[in-house]
Amino acid sequence: MSDAYASTVLAASRRERALYEELVGVYRGLAAALGDERFDRARVAAEQARAEAATTALRALAAELAPHRLTGAPLATETHALWQASAALAAEAVRLNGELAALARARQSAVAARLTTLDTGRQALAGYRPPTGLRAATVA
């Protein structure tokens, strides 16, 4: 194994771990945003963009690292440790992603319930309106 080869694989492995760390952080940020009563769409959109950028970069790295993982060629101990750390972070990202899906569904249900309540109130108020053309009498 050449030093250049080992160095390339090590650098890609470091980048992979850093991207998984970022993705886990982004997912935690999204969970906090979805759990906040004052829902901030801009914050959620920014976090979603960060998550998309991280997953896009991870897909590219997966393609780059796959041949090295599959060959069984000897690699530095640090490289194997990075791969194990990345795998643990990936598992955490999957777990957090499941939590995010549940939080998003809960937020969606809460919004739907609120809209139903508002619609019911709107319909009740509409029942108190006088028919078109009639005005309420004023008392002098």
Image (cartoon, rainbow, N blue to C red):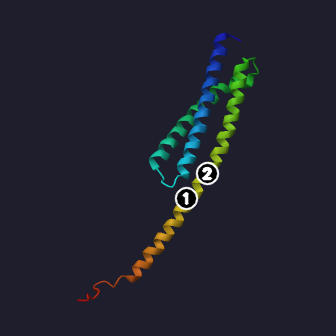
Amino acid type, mark 2: Ala
Where is residue 6? Give x, y as percent. Answer: 67, 15
The residue that mark 1 highlights is 108
Mark closer to the chain start, 1 or 2 = 2
Residue count near mark 1 (Cα–Cα under 10 Å), binned few <14, some 14–19, many ≥20:
few
Q: Which mark is residue 131?
A: none
Residue drawn at 33 percent across, 85 percent down: 131
Q: How many marks?
A: 2
Which corner quadrant of the image does residue 64 belong to?
top right
Please state, as top left, top right, bottom left or bottom right, where the C terminus lies in the image.
bottom left
Where is residue 71? Give x, y as percent. Answer: 74, 22
The residue that mark 2 highlights is 101
Q: Which of 75/140 is in front?
A: 140
Q: Secondary structure at mark 1?
A: helix
Mark 1 to mark 2 CA distance (whole Å)? 10 Å
Above-or-below relation of 128 to 50: below
